[in-house]
Amino acid sequence: MTSHTARTGTERTNVQKAALAVGAVFLLVGILGFVPGITSNYDQLSFAGHDSDAMLMGVFQVSILHNVVHLLFGIGGIALARTPGTAKNYLLWGGVVYLVLWIYGLLIDHDTEANFVPVNDADNWLHLVLGLGMVALALLLTRTADAGTRRPGHGNLNKNL
């Protein structure tokens, strides 16, 4: 006897699972940025700017704005994980945003008002990894689905022979 799993309307695709996981991690990081002890120098947490000396896990410079962005990015990922298309777009375009943020962090002087998020060297390299990872997830987890879809009129040319 063979068994099979019937596809239900609630079954998530891999890209949806990835977007949900990434969103959940960002949500958690946003929350942890407000937890004294996990965020060192918590008493020096400022709203925004390079003068915030609060450090998430003692490594990543954070501010209230930085934490709120993580919270919103996490909520967005969880919400956009509802469909494969929106999950892919979240990962792809979110990854692009993080790659732009990486470049921004490399170009600005970290001790100026231009560093309003704020970011440090550890943040910059994490943004690179996040950006590349999110773009890769978006493209790799949807490549078979995208390759399997055909536009009308572009099917098998030999079928009418």
Image: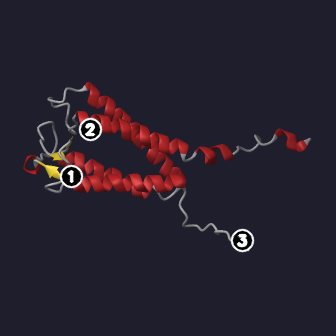
Labelled pair 1, 2 in contact (Cβ < 8 Å): no
Q: Which residue is mark 3?
A: 2
Q: Quadrant of the N terminus?
A: bottom right
Q: Position of residue 126 (x, y in %)?
A: 31, 39
Q: Please count the marks in the image.
A: 3
Q: Which residue is mark 2?
A: 123
Marks 1/2: CA distance? 13 Å
The single residue placed furthest to the left in the displayed view is 43
Q: Secondary structure at mark 1?
A: loop
* Mark 3 residue type: Thr
Please, which colouring scheme is shown? secondary structure
Q: In percent of the image, x 27 and y 25: which residue is there?
A: 107
Task: Judge from the rendering whether residue 44 lies leftward or rightward of residue 58; answer left or right.
Answer: left
Q: Position of residue 122 (x, y in %)?
A: 25, 37
Q: In percent of the image, x 89 and y 43: which residue is there?
A: 160
* Observer able to see residue 81: yes
**Neighbourhood count class around disc 3 (C-alpha, 10 Å): few under 14, some 14–19, many 20 upward:** few
Q: In percent of the image, x 23 and y 27: which residue is there?
A: 108
